Image (spheres, rainbow, N blue to C red):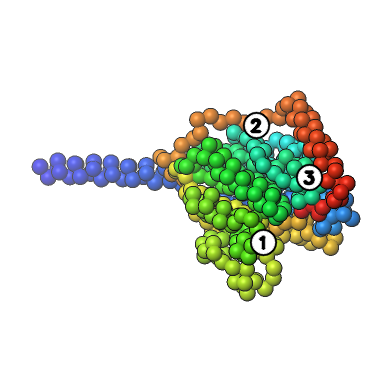
Amino acid sequence: MKKSLCLLLTVLLCCGTALFAGAEDTVSEKTLRVISFNVDGLPIPKALSSTKRPARAATRLLARQVNAAGCDILCAQEDFNYHGVLSRELEMDYRTVTSGPAVVGDGLNIFSKMPIYNVRRVAWNDAYGVFDCGSDELTPKGVLCCTVEADAGVYIDVYTLHADAWEDDDSMLAKASQFDQLLALIDEYSGTDRAVLLTGDFNTNYTTFREGYAAGHYNVDLCQKLLDNFVANGFRDAWVEANADGRYDFTSAEMYARYGVPYPRTWDTLDHIYYRSGKGVTLTLQDAYYDDMDCDGVTWPGHLSDHAAVCAAFTCTIDRSQAEAPQTLVKERAQPVRQLIRAIVSVGNTLRTAIAHLPDLLKNGVGWIK
């Protein structure tokens, strides 16, 4: 009887140990470093540039700085005319196929050390400004989304976007529409149970836009729109979580007292990395900060880009027993003929828009382009 009991206990102990070990094997962790960066890839002569930078040389240095930061995923905006330079210099094996230079393309691309699937580009339904107010109607801005294989058989959806630039009434309404369109796209592409990194140049922050609306300067509260559309739907802003204790109601005065400088490149900028955990993938923020990416190679009186990069590091906890792959995984391939057709259509649309607004140009001249 004692021998039988001992044998039974031994069997139960071995089975329990095996089950526990099996459960442990399904869970793993890795660090994921993400950068969102408006790389200022417009072909603007150095003399006319706000940063006074030689664009090609600056792009080369910029890529090297991203490499030095140990970046796993780079979400780029304004990656227009120097995409080739950026691609050659970045130490990343995967990237989306560029949609073309300025006027033709949207300037959005994602570079990754991990495979990229299911790439989709969506143009904004609404934009404002032709020869003024940011000239957003002359550039096919929008959002790019894709699925990145964060670990073998485990996937995260990644977005990069570029919203309208200006702060006049019509541009503010266009941005509000764009954020609504973005939320609908997330619901369609990612649903509610997939892990998501939502990045880009939102051209909207919390303090300036909240306080501007309260003072009657703006016709729409875009700060509240960010909170309602994204934070209220399970997203967290990496910089706010890491640097403002997760409080989204911080003020300009509070930040100025802490940093002693105005917000550009330092705090609460227009660029954001939002994150959301999903089924089988938990994203835990380690750190987030703004980085000018400037280095010793900068020999001109400016920056590598007119934006600071947003950098964030996450602990990515993967539970393979819960993670689910998308139903289909399609690798993007270059399609020169289709791209040429799209380029012709894009240039045609831009020319029609520009010609239609020539009376405004003759009357008001060219406004500041942001």
Secondary structure category for the residue under label 1 = loop
Which element is circle 2 on?
A: loop
Residue 332 tag number: 2
In percent of width and height, residue 118 lies at 59, 33
Comparing 104 with 328, the one in front is: 104
Of callouts 3 and 2, the N-terminal one: 3
What amino acid is labelled 1 in the image? His
Height in image: 345 above or below 53?
above
Calculate the distance from the C-alpha at mark 1 to the C-alpha at mark 3.
22 Å
Q: Which mark is residue 196?
A: none
Q: Amino acid at mark 2?
A: Glu
Picture coordinates of residue 16 (x, y %)?
28, 44
Verify CB contact (< 8 Å) between mark 3 and mark 2: no
Query: Is residue 102 toward the left or the right of residue 237 in the image?
Result: right
Viewer-side residue, 61 vs 336:
336
**Disc 3 residue type (three-letter):** Val
Write down the residue under mark 1: 217
Say if residue 328 shows up in the picture: yes
Q: Quadrant of the N terminus?
A: top left
The CA span between labels 3 and 2 is 32 Å
- The numbered mark, 1 or 2, whose residue comes first in the sequence reads 1
Q: Residue 130: which disc?
A: 3
Crowd band around label 3 with a 10 angstrom C-alpha radius: few (<14), some (14–19), many (20+): many
